[in-house]
Image (tube, grey):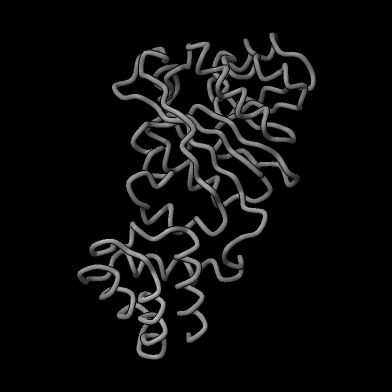
Amino acid sequence: MPTYRPGRHELGQNFLTDPEAVDTIVSLISQTAGPIVEIGSGGGALTLPMQALRRPITAIEIDPRLARTLARRVDPPTTIVPGDFMHYRLPRTPHVIVGNLPFHQTTAILRHLLHADHWTAAVLLLQWEVARRRAAVGGATMMTAQWWPWYVFDLAGRVPAAAFTPRPGVDAGLLKITRRSDPLVDAARRRRYKAFVHSVFTSKGRGLHEILPRVAGSSAKAAVRKWLAGQRFRGTPLPRDLSAPQWAEVFAIVDRYG
């Protein structure tokens, strides 16, 4: 089943038409290395300028008409692949992801990427508020906290709605995701760590000083309370207030006693 229905704007895409925004994205990509995989090339607003980087580009485009048209305009080693990115098999060698994500598919595509191996960095254009949440502006969400040990999430800029055609109802944000070369938690502990984060975010209690000892259990409770006493929190801290290193530290304590 295709991710989007046939059509153009009906596919859920708002095409980037602002040269300044394009330049910003290409500049961010220029700071990375390796082949590029583009999500939704559309008419080539990003594909064509990125060719100046002289790196292999594989652009996935769900609209076959747009894919055929763009394929006639690009030069090797750029390749246009007609199809749904959600069904595309990413390379098993290091590469970089770039894309103007269909707003209604943002979460699904993000989860797909975060579960994928081998890519080293991603520059993604998505709804402004979603970009802010993923970058933990104003506090981390559970999704961000669950992936923080393996990725760095940075808010790289705001793109106004007027930069797109058709114009969406909200501004967009540039999110840069970088895979950590030295993860904060071993990948073998990923499932246990994510379950721990889920428990902390969903448990009852007035702040971390009540929540964390309860989640830790009797064996780790004293160690967690000692760790909490050594942190410099203001007011009544909540799960959203923990940083990536703090999540890794407190998980290591609980995991040690588990």
**In the shown orientation, is residue 248 left or right of residue 183?**
left
User: Front-most of 119 and 6?
Assistant: 119
Residue 41: horizontal and vertical position, in percent?
A: 58, 21
Residue 187: horizontal and vertical position, in percent?
A: 61, 65
Name the residue located 59 percent from the left edge and 19 percent from the top edge: 46
Q: Quadrant of residue 28?
A: top right
Name the residue located 37 percent from the left edge and 44 percent from the top edge: 137
Q: Residue furthest left?
A: 206
**In the shown orientation, is residue 123 left or right of residue 166?**
right
Residue 65 in view (yes/no):
no
Residue 181: horizontal and vertical position, in percent?
A: 67, 54
Q: Quadrant of residue 34?
A: top right
Q: Residue furthest bottom?
A: 219
Residue 211: horizontal and vertical position, in percent?
A: 28, 73
Name the residue located 48 percent from the left edge and 12 percent from the top edge: 18
Q: How many marks?
A: 0
Q: Quadrant of residue 132?
A: top left
User: Front-most of 95 and 73?
Assistant: 95
Residue 103 in view (yes/no):
yes
User: Front-most of 106 and 227?
Assistant: 227
The relative height of residue 116 versus residue 21 in the rendered view (above or below) is below
